[in-house]
């Protein structure tokens, strides 16, 4: 089934990190997933984790250039959650043969593999960022993540001028790169 | 310092911040110095990674916020009502497993001892039929002999009363109407316990000695009515050889048993009941007998003491008759609506059990 125009709009919103779109998709799908997880040996926390992971996978899918969702959002999210939850159960050594397959599912293995690779890269970045220490971490976060201007950052951190702040930023960036690539290349 | 200057140049190059001459010069430099070329590629990739990382973080925040908003508005629910419950109940939930194990161990020892006593006692059970209700008084006594082994949780039982019998029962209406055998209710009142060990107060609202059926109504405020029942109650007769199963409480924990329908009439041609081939023990009285489609076909009631595995169940159609009679007598109370559609028809047995389990209760009758 082709996703209708309403769903396309929602996905576009999600790709642009629009809070209304996120909320709508969340509201329409969360309860089904929660019921599914709770019925299959999971807790409320598990349900939240799994569902939010699926939202991110959907976002990644919506962002990719070759993006075509060939089914309804509902089906896609359910398929992702189901796959993720079965995997989680397996990892925990808890086995359930009650996982109901009454709902329609679509193959999502490839998407999930990509998603996991991205997650691994983000985890490395997270670790690298956190081991930088202050003020490097906040400085880089300010410039590269929050996209603040150098002048602004200089005054916020108390550098006498923007050039000094910039200098410091590059020093920090080199350290971050070193930390990141040390891990990232091992992972490759 | 050179590294920093280079990095700055690369970043300006990537951000298109260079003038035309500078750009041409830099591109030439890239062409001629593979190291610098490599650095540009690497940095580009790194910046891209940073961008994705930023977007990812923002998204996680966005999703988290959405979750909180929906939670506040009540569009989604994470079972928060549990946390607002009283402390006693929380403690009970925390320790119920330990208590259940302790009680279970005590119960088994008591059963074992009473079994030994029965075995060696010269007195013969004169009745050909044995009612499958539990004689709790005997067990209780044995439990006291066990001393402190059983650390009893504060029970809903009124003070100064004693258990006289116990059996099983199951919901026939999600509002809290439970059906059981009349012979289970030997005393003056009863409480019911669900498969998770929660106790609820209940009133005996109707007893039909002839059919050996009784209706209890759960009156406890803590009882949360279900939306619907998973099973249905079968109006028509069942077929010989039909595979059946039951869930009941021969001990304080729910126990599953299975067998088949072996005769269309009960003991001595009793047309109100079926004969079943399955193992049943005291405490199974009042338990539902279900078929593969998740339909209740009877209420387990007695067994033949002279034969092994011969059990009798009151036919489910009697439930309809009895509820009709009850409606006529008591027009004031809430209408009982019997479930007519089985939601677990196509489910596997294990899944059926998981659904039905929540609707089967341990009935404990007490007397002043």
Image: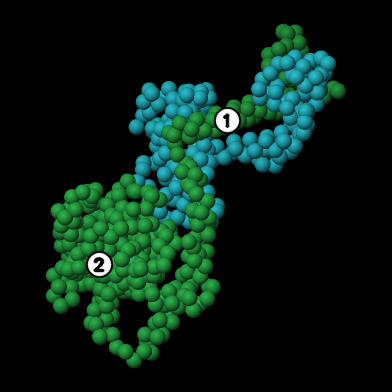
Chain colours: A cyan, B green
- In the rendered structure, which disc, 2 or 1, sits on the residue that comes first in sequence? 1
Q: Which residue lies at the image location 40% right of the left edge and 26% below the top edge? A: A7
Q: Residue lying at the far right in this picture: please name it.
A: B1
The x, y position of residue A180, in whole percent, is 72, 35
The x, y position of residue B205, in whole percent, is 25, 58
The secondary structure type at the circle numbered 1 is helix
The x, y position of residue A79, in whole percent, is 43, 41
Q: Residues within 10 Å of mark 2 (few under 14, many from 20)?
A: many
B115 above or below B180? Answer: below
Work out which quarter of the rendered image holds the C terminus of chain B and state it: bottom left
Q: Chain of mark 1?
A: B
- Which quarter of the picture shows residue B329? bottom left
B329 above or below B19? Answer: below
Q: Which residue lies at the image location 71% right of the left edge and 16% below the top edge? A: A149
B342 above or below B318? Answer: above
Q: Residues within 10 Å of mark 1 (few under 14, many from 20)?
A: few
User: In the displayed structure, does residue B307 sit left or right of residue B156?
Assistant: left
Q: Chain of mark 2?
A: B
Any mark on residue B182, and which? 2
Q: In this rendered view, identify the residue nearer to me: B82 or B228.
A: B82
User: In the displayed structure, does residue B241 sit left or right of residue B202?
Assistant: left
User: In the displayed structure, does residue B36 sit left or right of residue A50?
Assistant: right
Q: Residue lying at the far top in this picture: please name it.
A: B20
- Residue B8 can be seen, yes or no: no
- Which quarter of the picture shows residue B312? bottom left
* Residue marked by disc 1: B61
The secondary structure type at the circle numbered 2 is helix
Q: Which residue lies at the image location 57% right of the left edge and 40% below the top edge? A: A116
Q: In this rendered view, identify the residue nearer to me: B287 or A26.
A: B287
The x, y position of residue B65, in whole percent, is 54, 30
Q: Nearer the viewer, mark 2 or mark 1?
A: 2
Any mark on residue B219, and which? none
């Amino acid at each position: 089934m082709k996703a209708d125009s309403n769903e396309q709009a929602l996905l576009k919103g999600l790709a642009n990190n629009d809070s209304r779109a996120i909320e709508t998709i969340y509201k329409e799908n969360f309860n089904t997933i929660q019921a599914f997880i709770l019925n299959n040996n999971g807790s409320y926390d598990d349900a939240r984790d799994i569902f939010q992971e699926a939202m991110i996978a959907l976002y990644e899918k919506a962002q990719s250039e070759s993006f075509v969702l060939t089914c309804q959002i509902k089906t896609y999210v359910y398929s992702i959650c189901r796959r993720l939850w079965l995997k989680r159960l397996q990892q925990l050594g808890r086995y359930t043969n009650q996982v109901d397959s009454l709902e329609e599912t679509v193959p999502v293995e490839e998407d999930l593999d990509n998603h996991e690779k991205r997650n691994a890269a983000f985890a490395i970045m997270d670790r690298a960022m956190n081991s930088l220490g202050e003020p490097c971490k906040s400085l880089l976060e300010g410039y590269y993540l929050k996209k603040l201007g150098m002048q602004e950052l200089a005054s916020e951190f108390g550098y006498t001028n923007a050039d000094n702040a910039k200098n410091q930023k590059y020093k920090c960036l080199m350290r971050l790169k070193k930390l990141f690539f040390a891990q990232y290349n091992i992972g490759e | 310092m050179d590294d920093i200057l280079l990095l700055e140049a690369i970043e300006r190059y990537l951000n298109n911040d260079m003038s035309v001459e500078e750009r041409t010069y830099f591109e030439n430099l890239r062409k001629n110095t593979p190291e610098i070329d490599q650095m540009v590629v690497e940095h580009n990739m790194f910046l891209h990674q940073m961008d994705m990382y930023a977007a990812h973080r923002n998204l996680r925040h966005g999703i988290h916020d959405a979750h909180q908003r929906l939670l506040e508005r009540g569009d989604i629910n994470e079972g928060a009502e549990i946390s607002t419950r009283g402390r006693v109940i929380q403690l009970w939930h925390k320790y119920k497993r330990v208590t259940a194990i302790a009680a279970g161990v005590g119960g088994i020892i008591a059963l074992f001892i009473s079994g030994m006593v029965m075995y060696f006692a010269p007195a013969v059970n004169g009745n050909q039929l044995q009612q499958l209700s539990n004689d709790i008084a005997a067990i209780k006594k044995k439990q006291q002999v066990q001393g402190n082994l059983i650390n009893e949780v504060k029970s809903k039982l009124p003070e100064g009363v004693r258990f006289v019998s116990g059996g099983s029962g199951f919901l026939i209406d999600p509002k809290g109407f439970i059906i059981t055998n009349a012979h289970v209710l030997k005393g003056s009142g009863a409480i019911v316990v669900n498969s998770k060990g929660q106790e609820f107060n209940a009133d005996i609202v109707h007893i039909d000695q002839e059919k050996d059926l009784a209706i209890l109504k759960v009156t406890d405020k803590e009882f949360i009515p279900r939306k619907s029942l998973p099973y249905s109650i079968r109006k028509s007769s069942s077929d010989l050889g039909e595979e059946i199963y039951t869930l009941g409480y021969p001990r304080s924990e729910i126990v599953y048993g299975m067998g088949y329908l072996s005769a269309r009439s009960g003991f001595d041609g009793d047309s109100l009941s079926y004969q079943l081939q399955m193992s049943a023990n005291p405490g199974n009285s009042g338990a539902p007998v279900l078929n593969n489609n998740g339909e209740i076909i009877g209420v387990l009631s007695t067994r033949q003491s002279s034969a092994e595995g011969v059990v009798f169940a009151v036919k489910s159609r009697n439930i309809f008759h009895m509820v009709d009679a009850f409606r006529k007598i008591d027009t004031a109370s809430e209408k009982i609506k019997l479930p007519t559609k089985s939601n677990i028809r196509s489910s596997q047995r294990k899944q059926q059990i998981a659904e039905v389990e929540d609707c089967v209760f341990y009935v404990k009758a007490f007397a002043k």
